[in-house]
Amino acid sequence: MSPLKHKIKDGINEDLTGIEDELKRHLSPCLDLVSQVAGHILFCGGKRIRPLLMILSARICGYNGDQDKKYSTMFEYLHTATLLHDDVVDGASMRRGKPVANSIWDPATVILAGDFLLARALSISAETGSPKVIRTIADITEKMSQGEIHQLQRKNDSSLSESEYLEVIRNKTAVLVSGACRVGAIIAQASEIEEEALHTYGYHIGMAFQMADDLLDYTADSTVLGKHIGADLKEGKMTLPVIVAFERADSSDRKFMEKILNARDFSIQDFEKLLTLLTKYGGIEYTRRAAADHIQKAKQALTVFKPAITRNILSDIADFVLTRKS
């Protein structure tokens, strides 16, 4: 474990324990099959960043209630639902170092288990008694669906532009993270300035998180990452390192990249050549810089709040997003 990750964990261990307890409690009343399918991915090493950010956002705004752990679970349920659905749509084989759920259960069962988690998240949002929270969760769900459909429409499409990619990841990833931060502020009855600051922080964390995740597909150790290296490429996903390199490449290299993108499978040698091109044309470095810029903006948004332990943890989480290995 890196020193930064260790430092963060020391400050959130109690929160993590509370989140785990609530995730299990709200899953236990459902059918055994649903619990098994959902639990296959829900309890296999997720970082709980989204529920943690909701709890920390509420805390930095002075929340003193006892329902924050419970409310935070809706963000992990939403996230897990999208992962279950995505793995069916993408034909993935591994998730968090384990076989995907749809390789164990039939796809229909997995899809319906994901639907249950979406419904459970909406039910918990209703229990807050806040129309604003309910609207936020509904908006998140709608935009995440739009992001996934947009990405599916442009599968294996080398003409995907950077601006379109940014729109996809905003809807796929950033809206859930920014929504978690906003809901934390809402349940704490924070000021509009504080709420918007946390929403901004969450937006930039979400954008950087997805960019860093896209980089890991080309730079990580598969045993650490928990999925096969090059999985995004095999699923036909044009991510920022590839988009930038493809736009800058000469005709010969672009033709090779196009062949790799359209292949259902490719050799280790072809993948290594692609990595060379991503470095040659600056796709990897460009993505690193873009993610780092979002992290700086996220940390800047926190200056609305006075220096405090919770603000320090939120700042450390921002740095961790940029440096994580899985």
Image: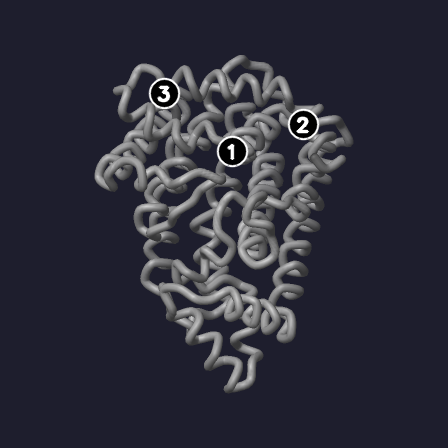
Question: Residue 164 location, x and y as percent?
Answer: 45, 64
CA–CA distance between discs 2 and 1? 14 Å
Tell me the residue at 39%/30% (across/down).
Answer: 40
The amino acid marked with disc number 1 is Gly
Q: Please, what is the three-letter code of the amino acid marked with disc 3? A: Leu
**Which of the marked residues, 2 or 1, is nearer the chain's N terminus?**
2
Quadrant for the N terminus, please: top right
The image shows residue 256 at horizontal and vertical percentages of 48, 78
- The first of marks 3 and 2 along the sequence is 2
Q: CA distance from mark 3 to mark 2?
A: 25 Å
Horizontal side, residue 31 vs residue 281: left or right: left
Q: Secondary structure at mark 1?
A: loop
Q: Please give the label number shown on residue 161.
A: none
SS under mark 3:
helix
Mark 2 residue type: Lys
Determine the residue located farthest toward the left in the rendered image: 108
Which residue position holds label 3?
27
Is residue 182 visible in the rendered image? The answer is: yes
Query: Do the numbered discs 1 and 3 sit on residues whose CB atoms are within 8 Å?
Result: no
Report the residue marked by disc 2.
9
Residue labelled with disc 1 = 46
